[in-house]
Amino acid sequence: MELILWRHAEAEEGDAGLPDGKRRLTARGEKQAKKVALWLQRNLPRKRTVLVSPAERTQQTAHALELPYEIEPRLGTGASAGDLLKAAGWPDRSGAVLIVGHQPTLGRVAALLLAGEEADWAVKKGGVWWFAGRERDGATQTVLRAVINPDFA
């Protein structure tokens, strides 16, 4: 299985009058999303599922990919690393799962997969962390295949 974590691109700052889930991408965020989406379009496997948080900014980010996606309530702003991994079906699902989500959840998942415990690792706005799970000598291993930020996509 491949698990691809994509943090939503730059979004409006939150304020008292706007619910967090309604925050939208900035003009810069839209450019970030398009740039990373082009990289993903060139590299995503054909067999893939795209799961997106219900938040407006994540859906806008996913929309730049121009592929069908499913809104997954378990990936909202308060999601835990466990929620995300269950929604993705890690590590047993076949194919690739692209998750468009939020910090600090994405960083905590990255830490859990690579270091074996959750920690508050930073995932840049619009950034992608691509993992693969594999079996070696009877043990499941996690491989970090790529980290791409909008500046390098």
Image: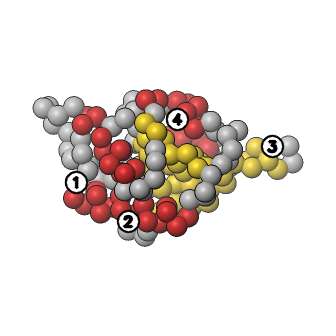
Which mark, residue 139? 3
- Indicate the position of residue 10 as horizontal and vertical percent values: 29, 53
Instruction: Say which element carries label 4.
Output: helix
Q: Please state which amino acid type lies under the numbered disc 1.
A: Thr
Residue plotted at (61% across, 44% down): 113
CB under 8 Å between discs 4 and 2: no
**Which residue is at the front of the view, 19 or 68?**
68
Mark found first going from the N terminus, 4 or 3 = 4
Q: Is 51 located above or below residue 83 in the figure? A: below
Please indicate, yes or no, whether residue 30 appears anywhere in the rendered image: yes
Q: Please state which amino acid type lies under the numbered disc 2.
A: Lys
Q: Label 1, label 2: how many angstroms apart (C-alpha)?
A: 14 Å
Which mark, residue 26? 1
Which quarter of the figure has residue 139?
top right
Residue plotted at (43% across, 29% down): 73
- Indicate the position of residue 6 as horizontal and vertical percent values: 45, 51
Residue position marked by numbered label 4 in the rendering = 84
Q: Label 4, label 1: how many angstroms apart (C-alpha)?
A: 25 Å
Mark found first going from the N terminus, 1 or 2 = 1
Instruction: Say which element carries label 3.
Output: strand
Residue position marked by numbered label 2 in the rendering = 35
